[in-house]
Image: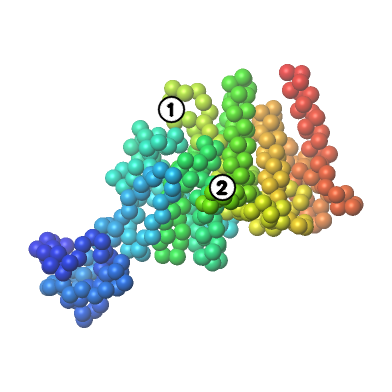
């Protein structure tokens, strides 16, 4: 702007960075008003032309760029003005992926001077100059009303705080700008399907077997943490239901240390359907959404679903993991899925879920699934 000489005028008017952003009205250029101070008008002795106000309006947004701080025991919340410029030096928002009805996700890199998020997080290599992060954006058209935003954000905070479980995704920050909520988390290398595809040809040795068992145990313990989560009131225990366990909602983080032979870590993510309840109401929950393949038999029934719904979904994922171990990616992606579909007894159309209903409406595990379990048991026993 080349107006350094005007800085004393702002100081004389009692204005500091805390009053930013500042606005003005055409025809009243001597008066500025502070958005952050209830639009309070302040008289500033400026001899500016219209272009100077336009440039000031443009550049002040860079002075409002937030610093994303890693806070112990809490998830920081930032309420950003529309003029605030986010400190993203690489923004892949044009390549965003839709996440069902609950928003979109895209990849960003944050300027190193605007965060300390690499400190103490295994998912982020502090040797990386510019680690990537994932931004999940929830907008009005995705969620409908503000309560929907708050519900998902609260669920993320309860489940995915900075010092949560190693197999639950970390929520690093939450901010609201314009009419959208944003959730910041580490950028994963893919989901469980991506791992199965990329690692289909790895040796089925003792190391892989041990890693898989460690991951399955970790996922179960992470789900337990969701199911038995304390509320802010230490006298009240909340009982959670994730509601959408599936391979797409299990993220894969590759091992960050080159000297390690580990295949990384699997973590549960996406709490769009997650809800928390008291013990009295936990057995009467109406599901808000589902993935047809991993839905449990009680879906759509009365009085509702319970935490057992998650057990069923996770069990289906476990069986698919064993299928991948024995038959590879093609086996889990196509062979097993097609057998389940061909064995379906639909009311309307075929699905590859893991159960059927008999004439009385009683659910039972599909015969194709039972055969797979028996076959795998025999294979593993012989090995």
163 vs 95: above or below: above
Residue at 44% from the left image edge and 22% from the top image edge? 259
Q: Quadrant of residue 337?
A: top right
Q: CA distance from mark 2 to mark 1?
A: 34 Å
Q: Position of residue 26 (x, y in %)?
A: 24, 79
Question: Compared to 333, does 135 lie above or below?
Answer: below
- Quarter of the picture containing the C terminus is top right
Residue 162 spot, x, y in % from top left: 45, 43
Q: How is the image coloured?
A: rainbow
**Which residue is situated farthest in the front direction here?**
235
Residue that extends furthest to the left in the rendered view of this protein: 5
Q: Quadrant of residue 65?
A: bottom left
- The residue tagged with tag 2: helix, strand or loop? strand
First reached walking from the N terminus: tag 2 or tag 1: 2
Which residue appears at 17% of the width and 75% of the height? 43
User: Looking at this view, is 152 or 71 the one in front?
Assistant: 71
In front: 271, or 278? 278
Q: Which mark is residue 355?
A: none
List the residue tagged with mark 1.
257
Q: Which residue is mark 2?
A: 230
Residue 342 appearing in the image? no
Crowding near the residue tagged with mark 2, few <14, some 14–19, many ≥20 C-alpha atoms within 10 Å: some
Which element type, helix, strand or loop, lies under badge 1? loop
Quarter holding the N terminus is: bottom left
Q: Is the residue marked by circle 1 packed among few (<14), some (14-19), or many (20+) residues within 10 Å?
A: few
107 lies above or below 179: above
Q: Residue at x 81, y 42 (%)?
A: 365
Tag in front: 2 or 1? 2
């Amino acid at each position: 702007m080349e107006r350094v000489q005007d800085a004393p005028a702002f100081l004389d008017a009692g204005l500091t960075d805390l009053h930013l952003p500042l606005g003005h009205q055409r025809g009243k250029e001597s008066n500025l008003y502070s958005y952050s101070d209830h639009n309070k008008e302040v008289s500033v002795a400026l001899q500016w032309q219209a272009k100077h106000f336009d440039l000031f309006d443009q550049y002040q947004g860079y002075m409002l760029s937030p610093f994303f701080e890693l806070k112990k025991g809490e998830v920081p919340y930032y309420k950003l003005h529309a003029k605030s410029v986010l400190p993203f030096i690489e923004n892949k928002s044009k390549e965003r992926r839709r996440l069902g009805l609950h928003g979109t996700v895209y990849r960003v890199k944050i300027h190193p001077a605007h965060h300390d998020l690499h400190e103490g997080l295994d998912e982020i290599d502090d040797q990386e100059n510019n680690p990537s992060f994932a931004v999940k954006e929830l907008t009005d058209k995705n969620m409908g009303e503000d309560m929907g935003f708050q519900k998902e954000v609260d669920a993320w905070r309860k489940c995915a705080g900075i010092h949560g479980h190693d197999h639950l995704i970390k929520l690093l920050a939450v901010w609201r700008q314009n009419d959208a909520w944003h959730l910041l988390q580490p950028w994963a290398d893919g989901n469980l399907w991506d791992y199965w595809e990329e690692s289909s040809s790895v040796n089925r040795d003792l190391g892989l077997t041990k890693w898989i068992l460690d991951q399955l145990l970790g996922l179960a313990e992470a789900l337990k943490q969701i199911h038995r989560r304390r509320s802010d009131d230490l006298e009240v225990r909340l009982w959670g239901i994730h509601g959408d366990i599936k391979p797409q909602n299990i993220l894969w983080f590759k091992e960050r240390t080159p000297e390690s032979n580990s295949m990384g870590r699997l973590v549960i993510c996406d709490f769009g359907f997650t809800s928390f309840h008291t013990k009295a109401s936990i057995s009467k929950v109406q599901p808000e959404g589902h993935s047809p393949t991993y839905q449990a038999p009680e879906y759509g029934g009365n009085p509702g679903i319970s935490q057992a719904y998650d057990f069923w979904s996770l069990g289906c994922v476990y069986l698919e993991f064993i299928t991948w171990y024995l038959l590879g990616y093609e086996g889990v992606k196509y062979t097993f899925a097609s057998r389940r579909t061909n064995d379906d007894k639909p009311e309307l159309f075929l699905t590859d879920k893991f159960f059927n209903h008999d004439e009385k409406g009683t659910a039972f595990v599909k015969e194709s699934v039972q055969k797979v379990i028996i076959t795998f048991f025999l294979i593993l026993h012989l090995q």
